[in-house]
């Protein structure tokens, strides 16, 4: 299965629209959003997404009840500050990445096949033992000047960063 991993959209509506378009072009079947939508109105831009969307909260997400409501309105799921997702026997941990002790522990224990994390806005893909660590960078493009997403292939457990 091809999974899109995104984060740090930070209310940048044109960038969200570009990300949704690219994810649809890539024919991903699942999108994992690692947080920092910021405001509830930004979530509505994911409605045209042709894949299931699962999200978690980031450190800049304000009104959690409103974000939860917006996720329900687009038939998507938001799980809190951390989530475990299992796809085709691939165990994925989702964390925004601002809780450094949690992030370090998730990586160090090698308990998951994939640790998807964000927060730094730096796109990276690397391995620690059996665990693939993915930071999709930032959709918003505010800090790096690049709007990026990650694409995960569960068949061969590989990922790549894509600039949109």
Image (spheres, rainbow, N blue to C red):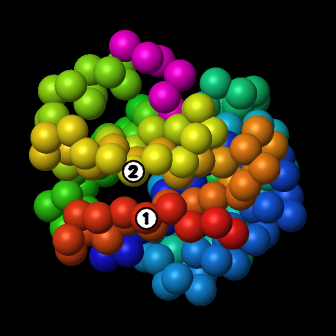
Of callouts 1 and 2, the N-terminal one? 2
Measuring 78% from the left and 69% from the top, which residue is drawn there? 17
**As drawn, 53 above or below 100:** below
> Residue drawn 16% across and 34% down?
110
Tell me the quarter of the image containing the C terminus. bottom right
* Residue nearest the observer in this picture, 33 or 144: 144
Q: Is residue 15 above or below residue 129?
A: below
Is 99 within the magenta? yes
Answer left or right for 91 relative to 139: left
Residue 142 on image: x %, y %: 81, 43
Front residue of 162/19: it is 162
- Residue highlighted by disc 1: 160
The answer to which quarter of the image holds residue 105 is: top left
Judging by the rendered image, the residue that carries numbered circle 2 is 125
- Residue drawn at x 75%, y 71% is 18
**Region of the chain picked out in magenta, as a range:** 96-101
Disc 1, disc 2: CB below 8 Å?
yes
**On the picture, is 12 further left or further right than 115?**
right
**10 Å neighbourhood of mark 2: few (<14), some, or many (≥20)?**
some
Q: Can residue 70 be seen here?
A: no
Figure quadrant of the N terminus: bottom left
Tell me, yes or no, if residue 154 can be seen here. Answer: yes
Quarter location, residue 14: bottom right
Q: Is residue 35 left or right of residue 101?
A: right
**Helix, strand or loop status at disc 1:** strand
**Residue 98 horizontal/vertical position (percent):** 53, 22
Question: Where residue 63 sits: x, y (%)?
Answer: 75, 29
Image quadrant where residue 8 sits:
top right
Label 1: few (<14), some or many (≥20) within 10 Å?
A: some
- The verdict on residue 20 being magenta is no
Magenta: main secondary structure: loop
């Amino acid at each position: 299965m091809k999974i899109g991993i995104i984060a740090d959209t930070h209310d940048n509506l044109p960038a969200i629209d570009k990300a949704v378009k690219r994810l649809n072009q890539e024919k991903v079947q699942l999108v994992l959003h690692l947080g920092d939508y910021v405001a509830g109105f930004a979530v509505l831009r994911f409605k045209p997404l042709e894949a299931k969307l699962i999200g978690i909260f980031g450190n800049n997400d304000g009104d959690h009840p409103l974000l939860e409501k917006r996720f329900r309105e687009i038939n998507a799921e938001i799980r809190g500050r951390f989530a475990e997702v299992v796809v085709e026997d691939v165990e994925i941990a989702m964390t925004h990445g601002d809780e450094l002790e949690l992030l370090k522990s998730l990586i160090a224990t090698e308990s998951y096949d994939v640790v998807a994390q964000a927060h730094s806005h730096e796109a990276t893909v690397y391995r620690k033992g059996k665990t693939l660590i993915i930071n999709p960078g930032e959709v918003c493009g505010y800090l790096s000047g690049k709007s990026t997403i990650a694409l995960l292939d569960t068949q061969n457990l590989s990922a790549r960063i894509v600039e949109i």
